[in-house]
Image (spheres, rainbow, N blue to C red):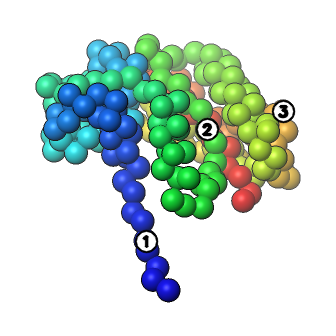
Amino acid sequence: MTRWVLHVDLDQFIAAVEVLRHPELRGRPVVVGGDGDPAKRGVVSTASYEARAFGVHSGLALRTARRRCPDAVFLPVDAGAYEAASAEVMADAAPYVPRSHGQEITFQHDITDWEQVRNEVTRLARQVAAGIAGEQRPVRRVVVKVRYAPFITRTHGQPLPAATSDAAAIERAALAALGRFTPGRPVRLLGVRAEFTR
């Protein structure tokens, strides 16, 4: 029996979905990220091959992307459209099972009050817990990401005493992970990710 291997560029996939929705963008540099306004803080979720030729890539600040490729078309993230397109594509393979679930927020203005940082991490942890509540997949570790100004990113993880999907336990682990960071530096982005046991 012949075996086939399917390779899909998932980074380009999002840009491809946007080009399908807007055929007039074919062949043009397309950047998807944030609310589509490169004057605001945010990061590139994906870039078309035409935009990548200018050094634009996922994770790059939108403002930097605009400097590198001023003629690019910037579009907001439309997660619902990408999920629908992905479901249609994946209807040619085994279902994808994510290894983690996370939430992030980029602040339009840096925050330096560590109590505010704690509050935001708590809020993100609760969102993560709510997002996995129906999956019945226990979490083994919680990871907190902090991006300091201007663009220095650090992560710390906290294992759970026992694998669980309990919201309070996830929140405690997130705050414990946050406790490993040095407070006081301006923060531009925070993220919380729950990693599953399977």
Nearest to N terminus: mark 2 or mark 1: 1
Above/below status of 9 relative to 165:
below
Q: How crowded is mark 3: few (under 14 residues within 10 Å), some or many (20 or more)?
A: some
**On the rendered structure, is 139 left or right of 149?**
right
Q: Identity of the amino acid at label 2?
A: Gly
Q: Is residue 142 visible?
A: yes
Q: How much space separates mark 2 and mark 1, taking CA atoms?
A: 29 Å
Q: Identity of the amino acid at label 3?
A: Ala
Residue placed at 51% from the left, 45% from the top? 88
Q: How much space separates mark 1 and mark 3, taking CA atoms?
A: 42 Å
Tag 2's secondary structure? strand
Mark 2 or 1: in front is: 1
Above/below status of 7 relative to 37:
below
Q: Which of 105 and 151 is in front in this view?
A: 105
Residue placed at 79% from the left, 37% from the top? 133
Mark 1 or 3: in front is: 1
**On the rendered structure, is 156 left or right of 24?**
right
For mark 1, what is the residue?
5
Q: Identity of the amino acid at label 1?
A: Val
Residue placed at 15% from the left, 25% from the top? 70
Q: Residues within 10 Å of mark 2 (few under 14, many from 20)?
A: some
Q: Please tell me in which quadrant of the rendered image residue 43 appears.
A: top left
Residue 168 circle label: 3
For mark 2, what is the residue?
102
Tag 1's secondary structure? loop
Outermost residue on the front side: it is: 1
Q: Residues within 10 Å of mark 1 (few under 14, many from 20)?
A: few
Q: Is residue 61 visible?
A: no
Residue placed at 43% from the left, 27% from the top? 77
Q: Which of 152 and 17 is in front in this view?
A: 17
Above/below status of 5 relative to 71:
below
Q: How much space separates mark 3 and mark 2, taking CA atoms?
A: 16 Å
